[in-house]
Amino acid sequence: MITKETAEKLEGQATPYYYYDLEMLNETLSVASGEAADRGFQVHYAVKANFNPVIMKIIAGYGLGADCVSGNEVEHAIACGFQAHETVFAGVGKSDREIEKALGLDIKCFNVESAAELEVIDSIAGRMGKKASVALRINPNVEAHTIRHITTGTDENKFGIRIVELDRVTEQMKELRNIHYSGIHFHIGSQITDLRVYRNLCSRINELWQWLTGRGLEPEDINVGGGLGVNYDDPDRFPPFAEYFDTFKNHLDGRIRSTISFELGRSLTANCGSLISRVLYVKPGAAETFVILDAGMTELMRPALYHAYHRIDNLTADGQEKRYTVVGPVCETTDTFGKLIALPETRRGDLIAIRSAGAYGEVMASRYNMRSLPPSVFSDGI
Ligand code: LLP
């Protein structure tokens, strides 16, 4: 939560920067991990959402596992306090070097996305005298009903092994001597707010569980992925963790004895972060008035990349509301945070918070236009 008092403290910092409310982060983690534990579920943190070491160390402190998508993420997660034996490595394009690194660190498992990858992992593990634990990432062909660009679990996506290939891949896997089959993995997309989508995922998991078990491949672990959405209109509201976990509790087949794990990213970190920026200029245009910030798509790329919405608060003005188009300084027309949005009358020097930016914000920053990467400021340090 950004109170008036917080805003006064933020005034003293040079902009732009990411501000993280650690109380909010801790509360979110405590609710999420508590609700999961109540239902016997395990939670991994999807490191890609935010790999800031301060945030990572706090999350590791709650005993979560780590879901990584590069060798660097695997190494970083372990350095930040995540247990190697609770770290999983997913991704369609793991390089040989990354596979070697992860095997050397004795991670929990690889989420394997193709038949070819299975063979490569087997051969590298053989060379290293190791046995690689693998979970098959299955593309369940379930529509996630979210932003098209962040859907991952339908047939046209590059992710996972398609169901029609499963027969051949499982037969192939039985021949590989350096592979230990540990289970199955799914991830259908991100920013999912319609929980009925997860019921469809459960039905697909139930069918696959039955099919695999019938072939002597009962999974030890079923990793159902992440994707739980947040409310971008109301950054102070917790994501519906209890309802989310209940959907799986109520819709997965009661005969399943596998451990059930989740990979949450956005729902754990989005709300605690804001991009704080200062108004450089208020500039009249032909049809709209532009508020030009000292932060742009280089600091927060989501609006430019996906037309994603983030709430924008003016922390230092409280006059009559007017409509503004809020833009950054970068040489691109898509460098726009909000079009014709209502803000109290805004002036040069006002402090602006772009909310719910704790996930896929700082980590996606770029140096385009030779801009500096944004620093981070934490609530316990202001
Ligand atoms: N597991 C896997 C295999 C994933 O690919 C992802 C996200 C997650 C878990 C975590 O999903 P979450 O709980 O955070 O929804 N940059 C985009 C989001 C891309 C998500 C990629 N995969 C955005 O800014 O919206």
Image (tube, rainbow, N blue to C red):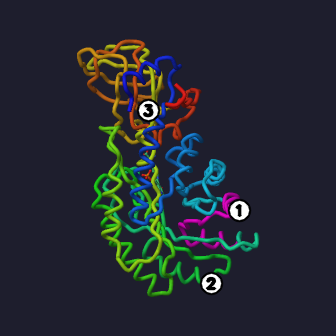
- Give the distance between the C-alpha atoms of the residues marked 2 and 3, in whole angstroms: 50 Å
- Disc 1 vs disc 3: which is toward the camera? 3
- Callout 1: few (<14), some (14-19), or many (20+) C-alpha neighbours within 10 Å? some
- The kind of residue on which mark 2 rests is Glu
Above or below for 66 versus 103:
above
Is 157 on the left-hand or right-hand side of 104?
left
Query: Which mark is drawn over residue 175?
Result: 2
Q: Is residue 103 magenta?
A: yes
The quadrant of the image that shows the N terminus is top left
Task: Looking at the image, tell me whether mark 1 or mark 2 is earlier in sequence order.
Answer: 1
Name the chief secondary structure element in magenta: helix
- The kind of residue on which mark 1 rests is Glu
Which residue in the protein does label 3 denote?
274
Which residue in the protein does label 1 denote?
100
Task: Looking at the image, tell me whether mark 2 or mark 3 is earlier in sequence order.
Answer: 2
Q: Does the magenta stretch include residue 125?
A: no
